[in-house]
Image (tube, grey):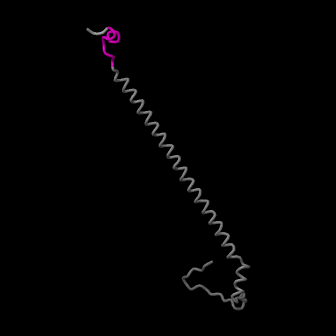
Amino acid sequence: MKPRVYRLFRTSTAAPRSRRTITVMTLVVVIATALAVQRVRARHAVVRLGYQLSLANEEVRQLREAERRLELERATLTNPARIHTLAAAMGMAPATADVIRLVRPAAGVAAVP
């Protein structure tokens, strides 16, 4: 003989298992997971590109600083007063007009402007 309590909770038919509901819920979870993974991947790409941009900006800054230093050095080295002082220290003097000779280019050789 079965206890009466058991009869209260027992149903005459089994609970229907809805494959469709389970399939839809599984599909929703898979889509949500895929979207979350895609968002993380996109965010990672943004951070990576930001880091690369930061490195490129730093390199540009360093190159501009090097260019500035080289321009200053060129201006210093090509200063006519400095060149005149160095030439005088080496015993050089400006050439007079009577010692300057013009040389014509050979046939077939282009003249340099």
* Spot occupied by residue 34 in the image (x, y as percentages of width and height): 43, 37
Q: Residue at x 62, y 62 (%)?
A: 64
Q: Quadrant of residue 17?
A: top left
Q: Is residue 11 magenta?
A: yes
Q: Quadrant of residue 100?
A: bottom right
* Spot occupied by residue 77 in the image (x, y as percentages of width and height): 67, 76
Range shown magenta: 4-16
Q: Residue at x 47, y 43 (%)?
A: 41
Nearest the viewer among 90 and 14 is 14
Q: Is residue 43 above or below residue 83?
A: above
Nearest the viewer among 103 and 56 is 56
Q: Residue at x 33, y 17 (%)?
A: 16
The C terminus: image quadrant: bottom right
For the image, the number of numbered tags is 0
The N terminus: image quadrant: top left
- The reply, left or right, for residue 103 in relation to residue 81 is left
Q: Is residue 107 above or below residue 43?
A: below
Q: Is residue 44 above or below residue 4?
A: below
* Spot occupied by residue 11 in the image (x, y as percentages of width and height): 32, 12
Q: Quadrant of residue 85?
A: bottom right
Nearest the viewer among 68 and 101 is 68
* Spot occupied by residue 40 in the image (x, y as percentages of width and height): 48, 41
Q: Residue at x 39, y 29 (%)?
A: 26
- The reply, left or right, for residue 60 in relation to residue 29 is right
Q: Is residue 3 above or below residue 44?
A: above
Direction bottom: furthest residue: 98
Direction left: furthest residue: 1
Q: Is residue 39 magenta?
A: no
